[in-house]
Image (cartoon, rainbow, N blue to C red):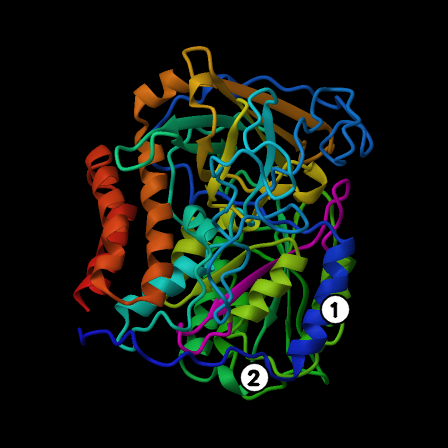
Amino acid sequence: MPTPNFTQPTRPRTLGALTLPLLAALAGACSSAADQHGSGSGGLTGPGSDSGPGSGSANPGETEGGGTDGWDSGDGASTSGWAPTTSGASGGDPGGSTGTGEEPPPPDDGEDSTSDASTTGDDSTSTGEPACDEQTPVVLYLSPDDSNSTSSPVQVREAVLSEWGSLSYVPIRTWEFLNYYSFGYAAAEKGMVTVLPEIARFAEDPDDQYVVQIGVASETVSNADRPLMNVTLVLDESGSMSGAPMELQQEVCRTIAGSLRAGDIVSAVGWDTVNAVKLTKYKVTKANDPELVALCDALEPGGGTDLNGGLTAGYELAHAQFDATRINRVVLISDGGANAGVTDIDIISNGAGSQDKDGIYLVGVGVGTPDTYNDELMDTVTDVGRGASLFIPSVAEAHKMFGERFVQTMAVAVRDVRVRLDMPPGFSIVKFSGEEYSADPAEVEPQHLAPNDAMVFHQTVATCAPALVDEAAEFKVAVRWKDPITFEDRETEVTKKIQESVAAESPLLKKGAAVFAYAEGLKAYREAPEAATLAPALAALAVAEAALPGDPDLAEIRTVLETLAGG
């Protein structure tokens, strides 16, 4: 393999003529639509783990309506103990919703993954308030990105291991790394979740810091047992799709055909203003249905570039065949090179549903190579469409995400998951793997969780009052979600004593720490491409490998890091 070159100039990341109207429309859509950003692991296939008391209890329909229990409003009005008990504890953002980071675009790494919320030891803050509140328990609401969004770690892997080899063009969204790699949390009962909070201390960390990892796992569903699907394929046949992108789109299409079963309904449209519809409400006869496979094989580049026309036709078909008893999905496949047509993103946001309504969620599938793929388009439209953003650079990845992980990519196990972290007085988050956290639940969007999946939150917390961390000190994680069919509220909570959890030394927490360090190390390396920059990530990886020998995810991470270090 040629030695990777990591000093190439950054390629401008543009979406051509659609950029300004698309982002302008997004700003309006995101302010009014419930944006699904869940986050989770790449599955439930790793080593087993005690699910704790969070695997069983639930209180269906405890509260109905919004703004009365603290989950939907920061006004403190509460009838069930869910209101926030602190204010101003959010991570750095003026709106109180996110941590602060160090990654200026391009490329766009999304929301920030680290926080400047650590205490300084001063007597007061810039607002004159005490720097350390030793009396008030801390309550924070957490959110990562969509539990199936996995684009950036795949882009990173392919960029490092491919011949062109540059990280300059690749976004690095830390939560997507925790989504992509698998954690072996015990699966939940149908319609339920398991919750496992874990706490640790590492020798190299300051005495006032702890690492907290929260796993929220869903039920296991096989492809044979899933509900039937309504799938609308929106296929890119523009000229930029020539070569590898078109071949990969065909493979994704064929792999989806192989995962569908008799009774599923499929429509297909292209980006063509004259005749976008290729297949209408076709009922699949079996896996690898010949008519659907033939459609995939016949795709070719050189057609129109009107994404708006394709999406409009696709959503019209999806709405016409909508069935609440089915999984309703629009799957957009593209190299991200659209340069005309998208002036109104409402067709996506209007189809995505609300917190009390099922929707037609958009799965965005990027194809091509990391040096040519435009990530912004897919990341933007899938945010509004309440779905996952994937990147498929190879036949093997197509089979992984739409074969092995087909149900995980396409289905929903529980809806509108919300996670609340209660900590003793004096604690704050100083590093955060997810997309946002806040003391105000209204600042954090609820997230759907797929079957065979787990949300994984990994954060470092610090205390300005270490004397309070005694044998009785506890962390509590509460999770609320909606039943996938009835939309009734359910909730559960798990409490862990800090000292007991630290003594347990969880292998899965160590894996999470390695994945987190990997993503953060890649960001640091992109800024300063020196082998020494990767030392913290390699050290965290070694700890995880000792706890989980033979783990294939950790082996992949080592390959990427050692390739970078040797380059």
Secondary structure beneath disc 1?
helix
Q: Residues within 10 Å of mark 1 (few under 14, many from 20)?
A: some
Q: Residues within 10 Å of mark 2 (few under 14, many from 20)?
A: many
Q: Is residue 459 above or below residue 254?
A: above
Q: Is residue 491 magenta?
A: no
Secondary structure beneath disc 2?
loop
Circle number at residue 238: 2
Q: Is residue 363 magenta?
A: yes
State the image coordinates of residue 127 (x, y, percent, origin top left). Answer: 65, 41
State the image coordinates of residue 315 (x, y, percent, origin top left). Answer: 73, 64
Magenta stretch: helix, strand or loop mostly: loop
Quarter assignment of residue 418: top right
Q: What's the residue type where badge 2 is placed?
A: Ser
Q: Look at mark 1 in the image and give the residue it sits on.
A: 25
Tell whether 298 sits left or right of 513: right
Start and end of the magenta stretch? 352-374
Q: Residue 52 versus residue 320: which sits nearer the camera?
A: 52
Quadrant position of the C terminus in the picture:
bottom left
Instruction: Please give the count of numbered marks on the rendered protein.
Output: 2
Q: Mark 1 and mark 2 in contact (Cβ < 8 Å)?
A: no
Marks 2 and 1 sit apart, C-alpha to C-alpha, by 23 Å
| Residue 552 visible, this orientation | no
Q: Nearer the viewer, mark 2 or mark 1?
A: 1
Q: Residue 485 versus residue 172: which sits nearer the camera?
A: 172
Q: Residue 292 versus residue 432: which sits nearer the camera?
A: 432
Q: What's the residue type where badge 1 is placed?
A: Ala
